[in-house]
Structures are given as C-alpha cells and as structure tokens.
C-alpha cells in the first residue's frame, strides 16, 4: 500500500514511533508543567530524573532481582523520595531569590547526577528486556505492531489523564492550584504550603521516573539518555504554553508525531523540527498554544 | 547646597573615585597580561582570554541587563567555525576573520533575539537554549563543519598579512590586544547612557518602560552586542587552539560561561575575567581526574548558587566597599 508516494508501513511505523516519543515528551513536560506551576522553577534535573528512573529499575533487576512490574511502582517512589530530599535541602532555600538561580542550581545538580552515573556505570548503554507479558506484537496485516510500544502509549496517556484529574478535580489539586495563585493566603488558611511544594516536586519527579522505566526496554539505559530529551521537552513546554497541563500533554503527543512524520519526509531535519516549530509558535503566539498570562 | 546638587556632587565623587579604581584595576590587568607568558604556557593563556571575553560578553547581558541566555554557546561556536572556515578556505587574515565572526555572531544573535525577546525571565533562558540546540544540530549535519572531527586550521596566518602569529607568543600578543579592545568596549558600554538604561531595565523594567524607553529594543541591542562579543571570543579560541569543534556549540559550553560569570561575580566588570581564569585553571588542573571534572563543575555551580552568589569579585568589592 502506498500513500503520498510512500509505503504505508513506513508511514505508520514512523507515526507509531512518533507517538512513543510523544508519550515521553508528554509525560516529561507534564511533570515540568506541574513543578513550574506550583514552584515557579524550571527543573533542569528532569532529564536526570528520567534517566534515574530507568537506572533504578535496571538496578532493581540486577541487584535485587525485582522485575519490570514492581520497578514500575518502586522506581518512581525511590526517585520521588530522592527528589523530595533535594527540594527540602537545597531548592527550597532559593524560592525567595530570582528564579534564575533555582534554574542554574538544577542545571548544576543535573550535571552532577549525570557525571556520577557515567563514572560509576560507564557511558555504554545497558539493555533492559521487555517484560514477558508484553512481548510479541499485533499483526496488522501490512506490519507487526509491537505490543510493548502500544503499552507505552496507553500507559502514558492514562497517567496524563490521571494527573490532570488529580490537579483539576480533587481537593489536593484545588489546594495546589490555590497555592499557585497566592501561596501566602493559602498558608494563612492552614495549608502547609512548604510541604505541598515538596510533594509537588516529588510528584513531578516520580512522573519523570515513571517515563524512565517505560523507556528502559525501548532505549537502552544510559547516563546521557535524559539530557538530550530534556532540551526537546523544554521546547515542547514553550510550544504548549507553560503552566498549562492540557497544553503540555497535547503538545507532547503532537510534536512526537510531527517529528515522526518529518523522519519519513525529510529525515535530516527530524532532530531540529521541534525547535523550528517552537520558533514559529513564538513568533505567532508568544504565550504558547494553550498558555495564559505573560 | 540643595539636595539635588548634593546628590549630583555625590555621584560625581563616586564616578571620579570609581574611575580611579577602574584605572588601577585595568593597569593591574595589563601588567598581568604582559607578565603572564613569562610564567605560563601561551596557548593556555589564550584559551583563558578567549573564555574571559566570552564571560564578559555574557555578563553584559546577564549581569547588566538582567536577561539570562542559556544558549550563548551558539554564538561562541559560530565565531569559532567562521574563523576556522574563512581562514582555511578563503585565506582570510586573522583580524578580518574575527570581523567576519563578529558579523556572523551578531546576525545569529539578531535572529535568536527577535524570537526569544518575546518571552521573559526563565522562558527566555529556555527559548535560547532550544534555539542553540537547533543550531547545534545544524552544525552537526552541515558538511562544512566536518562533523565530529571539527575544522582543523592550517595555520594562524599573519595579522594584516604582514605580522606572522604562527608562534604561540606572537599569537598571544594578538589575542591579548583583541581582548583588551573588546574589554574596553564593554567598560565603555556599561558606563554609557545606553548602559545606564540597561542597568535600569535590570533593576526595574516596568519603571523604565513607563519613562518612555523602548525596553525591548534596548534588550535586543544588548543581546546582539553580547552575541557578537561571544562570537569574537569563539574566534579567538579557534585562533589559539587551531581548532573549531562541536563542543564549542554544545550547551555544556553555555553552562560553562554561566558558571564562570557567576563564580567571578555577576554584574561586576572584572568578575567574569577572574571567573574565567579560576575556572579554566581549575579544569586544566583537574583534567587528570577525567570525567569527574563534570561532577566538580556541577558541584561548584551548585555551591556558587547556594552560598556564593556574589562571586569572587563581588565579595571582594563588598568587603572593600568599592565598585569593581
């Protein structure tokens, strides 16, 4: 089958690959958006947390013998706990200053974490097997759709919707949104805002780690897997509109697909297309596609 | 004396006092530049000067205008590639190649600036980072950069086509002169009425806007100036080492310049120079620890941000109650 002069199988497989990358972009930019919305900082560590999520699941398998499914829960928990510690000990000291300092701090921490993993584990990637349950694929007649990739897309979509629900529809989410608007008043009403902030940061980090576990069987586990992704995710966040949860999810998936399609049409620019889209969006709609305020 | 006159007299006093301090500090710098090659390896010194200029140009933007670009490696790398390529292919003399780098850096700075200036604060940092990453991929794929190998220069050529700078010492003299010229330009800019507007924008943008200044235009000019200087710095680095590589455009280099500026003292004239000297020496000294250097760089950045935000020169100036 041929569409637009290209074999359908090629288009669909790149589209699917795009959806998978989009799933990671969406989950990561969602975490960034949640952290930014509440804490007002841009979390450069996000890529490192994504990498840690993958590494922790690899360690759990190698050292403890725990497989994929326990890791899917344990790894975000462990990374979230470490992130809470980071927020409590270091980041929380910087809220009173210009947010640029917090950004630089997270950049420094990301450098440290990445160097630490590279020095301990080397820069070569480590394979992580696809869990038994999700091996094999669905035969679509013209191509075979790997089951695991389908699972990644579905799992991230569910997670994104769940996060949106938690923030928009639950009472904890209401407190969170209120704290974003005016932390002082929410504090005066008896909500422990510093703890809320720690929780939010840990939550965003856990999202990144979850994406890391999902990514482990697809990309091999390596120290630099987060850094390259995080800059793309920044661009996604700018396109979606900072602080908009809906925007970050939609933009994440959409840009993954656009990137996949570019790989079919003009492979050379597949690594730059997202940045180009960002530049165009900024020229037309400086606030991003779904952004409000300045 | 009326209050206003007193204020004017005071500011004049500070200015005269300040000018004396600057002259002393610049004098010390010139003496250090002359004395340094007797003690240290000229190629290392050239590298230090290139990064010092890079940091000074960055500081003009971050320290004096209050906008933080996280994509300055784009301009540094552009300058480095332009110099290496034009000298190799067209046989340009070093000073003309540096002018070409200046023009190239300013042009890309203008494009980035027009796009990024639409957002403020952290967004600005994110947008510049993303645009720089775009340029990184372009350079990675473009054939003229020779990909991962980088451009190896055939030689350093002759300034004005007559004075050969093939020897390390001669090249060092050339790099020092260019550095001093650019440094003077920065000092002049900071103290000009234009520089006053930049500092005012940093301190209270809304107020400056309400006084009728076109803030965005000032910011854009500062951005272009800063990128042009970064490109010259990159060009100097290429002349010094005879090499332009992808690392010059990589975002780690953008991180380096932030670290140097912060370490030396944000918004001080001499801070970035000191920061570049300290940081480059430190990396050189620590290079035997291999990849742990990155870890230490991260650690130093974290410590600077948490405990030492005024930086070396900023701290010194605060202790001595002077402006530097």
Image (cartoon, rainbow, N blue to C red):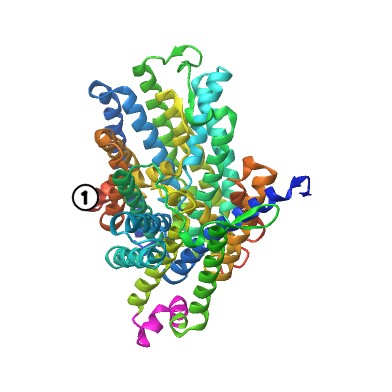
The 10 Å Cα crowd at callout 1, few under 14, some 14 to 19, many 20 or more, is few
Is A9 displayed left or right of B297 in the figure? right
Q: Which residues are magenta?
A: A175-192
Is B19 displayed left or right of A159 in the figure? left
Give x and y (percent) for residue B154: 48, 16
Picture layout, residue B284 above or below residue B125: above
Q: Does residue A14 appear in this view?
A: yes
Give x and y (percent) for residue B159: 47, 17
Residue found at x 25% / y 57%: B307
Give x and y (percent) for residue B61: 45, 48
Picture layout, residue B12 above or below residue A172: above
- Can residue A40 be found in the magenta stretch? no
Q: Nearer the viewer, residue B9 or B289?
A: B289
Q: Does residue B187 appear in this view?
A: no
Residue found at x 44% / y 57%: B202
Task: Characterize the magenta stretch by its predominant secondary structure.
Answer: helix
Is B155 displayed left or right of A92 in the figure? right
Host chain of mark 1: B
Residue position for label 1:
B320
Is A147 displayed left or right of A79 in the figure? right
Give x and y (percent) for residue B46: 36, 27
Q: Nearer the viewer, residue A37 or A126?
A: A126
Q: Nearer the viewer, residue A224 or B34?
A: A224
């Amino acid at each position: 089958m041929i569409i637009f002069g290209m074999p359908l199988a090629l288009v669909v497989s790149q589209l699917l690959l795009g959806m998978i990358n989009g799933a990671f972009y969406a989950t990561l930019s969602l975490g960034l958006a949640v952290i930014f919305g509440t804490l007002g900082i841009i979390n450069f560590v996000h890529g490192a947390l994504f990498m840690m999520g993958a590494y922790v699941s690899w360690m759990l398998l190698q050292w403890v013998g725990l497989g994929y499914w326990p890791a899917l829960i344990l790894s975000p928990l462990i990374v979230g706990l470490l992130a809470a510690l980071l927020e409590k000990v270091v980041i929380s000291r910087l809220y009173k200053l210009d947010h640029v300092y917090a950004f630089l701090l997270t950049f420094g921490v990301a450098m440290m974490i990445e160097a630490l993993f590279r020095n301990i584990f080397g820069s070569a990637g480590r394979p992580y097997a696809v869990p038994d349950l999700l091996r094999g694929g669905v035969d679509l007649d013209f191509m075979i759709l790997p089951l695991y990739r389908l699972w990644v897309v579905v799992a991230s979509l569910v997670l994104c919707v769940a996060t949106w629900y938690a923030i928009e529809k639950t009472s904890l989410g209401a407190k969170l949104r209120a704290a974003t608007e005016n932390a002082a008043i929410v504090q005066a009403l008896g909500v422990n805002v510093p703890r809320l902030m720690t929780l939010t940061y840990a939550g965003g980090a856990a999202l990144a780690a979850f994406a890391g576990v999902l990514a482990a069987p697809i990309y091999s586990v390596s120290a630099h897997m987060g850094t390259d992704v995080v800059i793309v995710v920044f661009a996604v966040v700018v396109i979606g509109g900072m602080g908009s949860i809906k925007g970050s999810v939609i933009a994440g998936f959409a840009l993954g697909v656009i990137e996949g399609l570019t790989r079919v049409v003009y492979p050379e620019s597949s690594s730059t297309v997202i940045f180009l889209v960002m530049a165009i969006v900024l020229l037309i709609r400086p606030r991003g596609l779904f952004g409000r305020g300045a | 004396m009326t209050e206003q006159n007193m204020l004017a007299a005071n500011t004049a006093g500070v200015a005269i006092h300040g000018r004396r301090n600057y002259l002393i500090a610049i004098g010390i710098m010139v003496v250090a530049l002359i004395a340094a090659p007797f003690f240290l390896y000229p190629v290392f010194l050239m590298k230090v000067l290139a990064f010092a200029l890079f940091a000074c140009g960055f500081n003009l933007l971050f320290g004096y205008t209050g906008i933080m670009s996280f994509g300055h490696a784009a301009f540094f790398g552009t300058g480095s590639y332009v110099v290496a390529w034009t000298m190799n292919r067209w046989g340009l003399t070093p000073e003309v190649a540096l002018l070409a780098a200046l023009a190239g850096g300013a042009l890309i700075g203008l494009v980035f600036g027009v796009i990024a200036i639409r957002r403020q604060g952290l967004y600005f940092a994110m947008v510049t980072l993303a645009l720089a990453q775009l340029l990184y991929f372009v350079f990675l794929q473009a054939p003229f950069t020779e990909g991962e190998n980088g451009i190896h220069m055939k030689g350093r050529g002759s300034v004005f086509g007559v004075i050969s700078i093939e020897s390390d010492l001669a090249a060092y003299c050339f790099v020092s002169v260019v550095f001093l010229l650019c440094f003077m330009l920065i000092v002049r800019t900071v103290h000009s009425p234009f520089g006053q507007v930049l500092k005012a924008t940093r301190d209270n943008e809304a107020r400056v806007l309400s006084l009728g200044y076109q803030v965005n235009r000032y910011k854009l000019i500062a951005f272009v100036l800063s990128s042009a200087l970064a490109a010259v710095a990159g060009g100097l680095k290429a002349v010094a080492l005879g090499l332009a590589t992808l690392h010059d455009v990589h975002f780690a280099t953008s991180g380096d310049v932030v670290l140097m500026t912060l370490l030396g003292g944000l918004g001080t004239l001499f801070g970035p120079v000191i920061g570049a000297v300290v940081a480059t020496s430190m990396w050189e000294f620590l290079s035997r620890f291999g990849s742990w250097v990155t870890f230490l760089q991260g650690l130093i950045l974290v410590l600077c941000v948490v405990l030492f935000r005024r930086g070396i020169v900023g701290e010194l100036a605060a202790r001595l109650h002077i402006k530097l």
